[in-house]
Amino acid sequence: MFVTITFIRWLHLVGAAALVGGMVLQLFVVSPLLSGIDPALRGKLAKKASDYYLPVFWVSLALLIITGAFVIFDRLVSLENMVFPYKNSYETFWLLKLSFVGAIGLLGILIARLSNEIRGASKEQMAVTEDVTKISLLENRKHRLRHVVSLLRNLNVVLGIFVLLWAAVLQNIFGLLILR
């Protein structure tokens, strides 16, 4: 059992590194790189980057949820018959961590939908060549959507870092419970 749970925890860490590392890479490398590129090419490159990263994001998130369920089950079974002052803290921090993971997933869905709206506005803008007002409105819409997506990505990175922080807190609380 020790080898199995160790392997599951290792998979959990790999999933966390891939998820948070990928979000940080998108935020601090890919986005600044794309902002300096010609707008006509930017959309295609952003789509290509998303096509590569989205499967990593969703597989990592699924891996984290599945392995996290095993880890928390193992921890809660270990604490089942124990009565300690920190036990409720452990469960509270665990629920907080789980809510952050859920928020990361929901924000991922929202970011994907808004990115599709940006692509749709770009296609519509290319189709409309004569109406300057409509082209301007579409450009303003794309600009606003890009700003919102950027803010949501920042929030997702912050939530990912909080999840890692909460994991460390949970590890310390668990250590206190077991060592007491």
Image: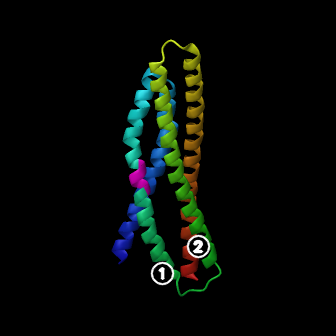
Q: Where 68 sits versus 83, above or below?
A: above
For label 2, the residue is: 91
* Magenta segment, prevailing SS (helix, strand or loop): helix
Q: Nearer the viewer, residue 165 or 122?
A: 122
Q: Quadrant of the C terminus?
A: bottom right
Extreme residue toward the top, this view? 130
Q: Where 14 sits versus 83, above or below?
A: above
Q: Is residue 172 visible?
A: yes
Q: Which residues are magenta?
A: 57-61
Residue 126's disc number: none
Amino acid tagged 2: Glu
Distance from disc 1 to disc 2, alpha carbons, whole Å, reads: 12 Å
For label 1, the residue is: 77
Q: Residue 145's quadrant in the figure?
A: top right
Q: Is-magenta flag for residue 123?
A: no
Amino acid tagged 1: Val
Label 2: element kind: helix
Q: Nearer the viewer, residue 167 or 58?
A: 58
Location of residue 122 in the rendering, given as x and y in whole percent from the top left corner: 48, 26
